[in-house]
Image (cartoon, rainbow, N blue to C red):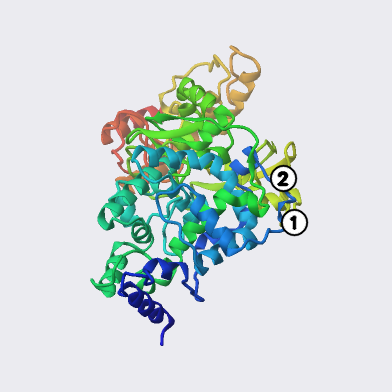
Amino acid sequence: MNKYFHIFLTAACLATAPAAGAATVLDVRESLHDNAIIYPESFETDVQRMQHDWYLRRYAAIDSAADRSPDTPVTDEELIRRLQAIPTTIEMPYNSVVRSYIDMYTQRRRQLVENMLGLSHYYMPIFEEALDRYDMPMELKYLPVIESALNPTAVSRVGATGLWQFMLPTATGQGLEVNTLVDERRDPYKATDAAVRYLKQLHATYGDWSLAIAAYNCGPGNVNKALRRLGSGAGKKDFWAIYPFLPAETRGYVPAFIAATYVMNYYGKHNISPALARRPMVVDSVHVCRRVHFEQIADVMGISLDELRTLNPQYRKDVIPGHIKPYPLVLPSLQAYAFVANEDSIVAHNAAKYATREVVEPATGAAVKGSDASGEYIDETTVKYHKVRKGETLSSIARRYGVTTAALRSTNKLGRKSGVRVGQSLKIVTTTRRYVPKAPAPDTTRQIEPAPLDTLQPGPIVIEADTAASTQAAAEATPQAAQVARAMASSPKSEAPKPKAESKSSGSKQAAGTSASKASSRASNHTVQKGDNLYRISKQYGVSVADLRAANGLKNDNLQIGQKLKIPAKSTSSRNNRKK
C-alpha cells in the first residue's frame, strides 16, 4: 500500500472517531512520519557565493569560527515547548517532518542561517511594515527564508523570481510590472506588498493559515484538488488533513515554514552566530523621471555598481526608464539628497553613450561592410589603467570598460580564482574599430588652358608674372615659345629675343594647319577622353576655343568624360590668321 495513502487512511479514521477520548487530526500532525521529504530550493543556496553580497560585505560581520561550534542536542519535548512559546497566530505543531527541517537548519545548513540572519537586518523591517499595514500575522515574515533564502534576485528552476518567489502570472495578477528593463518581483518593497495582499486573499478564501500558506506555494488549484479528494466528512480541513494529496514539494512547505520560524528565534540555543550588523543602513528613495543608467549614477556620485544593484534589484539591465513614467531609486539617505541636487549632471554624463534615438533616418546608400575602394576599417588599441576602489570586483570593472573578465585576467596575469584588492592598478586594453574614408581622387575634368596661339598679336612678348598657368601655356606651345618663356622668366619685363628659325616655324605651323584641316574634314564629332580640354581639342581639329564653345552651347570650360562635342567647320578668319 502506498505510504501516503496509508497516512490519509490513518488521518481519516482518527478524524471520524468518537469525540470522547478519541484521537484527533491534531494527533496525526504531531505524529506524522514521511521518509520522502523534498527540501525547498533555498536549502541549495551557495553560501560562499552568498557572502559576496554587497550588503553582507559592507554592513555585516560574520564570525568565521561559528562553524566550529557544535550544535546542542535538543529533545522533542524541548522543541515542542519552544515552538509553543513563540507568540504567533499561526499554529506551530511538531512532528518528525518538522524535526527534519529544524535539524537541516541547525546542523547541516548552519552557515546559511548565519547569512540569512545578517540579511534579515535589512529585509525584515520591510516585511514587518507591510504585514502591519495589512494587519497580518508577523510570523509570515519568515516565508521568504524558505522561498529564496532572502535573495531578491533568486530564480527557481520553474521561473519563480524574487524574495517571495512569484511566478509571472501571479505577479502580473497582483499588479507587478515585468518587462525587459524592470522586474518588480525583485523589488523588495513592491514584491512584499503584493505577497502580503495575496496571502490575505488566500486566507479569506480558505479561512485557515496552513491552507493559505500551502496555496501560496503550489497554487489554489492544487489545494482545491486535494480538498476534493479528502471529501466533506473528514472533520477539520487544514494542511495536515490534505497532506498526502498535495504535490511532494508542497508537503514539506508548511513544516519548513515552522522550522524557519523556530531557527530565526532560537538560533542562539544551537550555538549559531548571526552575521551582525556593523553599522545601521538608513535608506531613502527618490523618483526618477528621466532615463538614466546605473553607471552614470556611479560615476558622478561615487557609488559602486554593486551597491546600486543590491538596493535596486528590480532593474534588470541597470537602466531606469524614467522617461516612460516615474520609477523609484533607493539610495543611502544622505546620497538621496545628493542625487536630487545633481540629477542634471548625472543625466548629462556620457549622455551620447546611453541615449536612445527617437528618430532615425535610413541611409541612402549601401552600408560599408569592410575595406573597399572608398575606405577601410582600422583597429585602434587603447591602454588605460584603473585603480581598484572599495566594493569593485573584476566583473564590475570588466563591464565598466566593455571587456571580458578573461581578458582582464590575461592582461594582468591573474589566476583563474584570483580576485582584486583595493588600490590595485589594473591594465585595461580596449580595441575600437574605426572606418577611415580614402581621400577623393583629383578632378581631371577641369584644367587651366593657355591662350590660343592664333589669337596672339605680333610684337614683343612681355611676361608680367611667373605664374604656373603662363609657364604651362608656353610649354604646350612650340618649342621656340617655351624657350622664350624660360628666358623671360629669369628677366621680368624684358623684351624676348626673336626666334632665329622663323621660316622653319612658319612651315611647321602650316604643316600643323594642313593636318588639322584633314582631321576636321574626317570628323564632325568628338568624344571627350580622360585628359581632354577645350584647348587641346581645338588644336586637334584646327578650330578656335570660341568656335567650340559656340557650336556646343558651352557656358564654361568644364567637360565630362564621354561627352559628345560637335566640331565646327574652320572659319575663314581663322584660316587667314594662320596664313599671316
Which residue, as the protein is rendered here, is positioned at the far left? 232
Is 59 or 374 nearer to us in this picture? 59
* Amino acid marked by disc 2: Val
Return the x and y of residue 470 as percentages of the image width and height: 53, 24
Q: Judge from the rendering whether residue 190 lies leftward or rightward of residue 504; answer left or right.
A: left
Is 162 or 426 nearer to us in this picture? 162
Q: Judge from the rendering whether residue 352 lies leftward or rightward of residue 495; answer left or right.
A: left
In the figure, residue 357 lies in which quadrant?
top left
User: Residue at left 35%, top 35%?
Assistant: 543
Secondary structure at numbered mark 1: helix
Circle 1 crowding by C-alpha within 10 Å: few under 14, some 14–19, many from 20: few
Q: Judge from the rendering whether residue 367 lies leftward or rightward of residue 301; answer left or right.
A: left
Is there a contact, CB below 8 Å, between mark 2 and mark 1? no
Residue under label 2: 420
Return the x and y of residue 426 as percentages of the image width and height: 72, 42
Residue under label 1: 68
Secondary structure at numbered mark 2: loop
Circle 2 crowding by C-alpha within 10 Å: few under 14, some 14–19, many from 20: some
Is 469 or 211 nearer to us in this picture? 211
* Amino acid marked by disc 1: Arg
User: Residue at left 49%, top 63%?
Assistant: 94
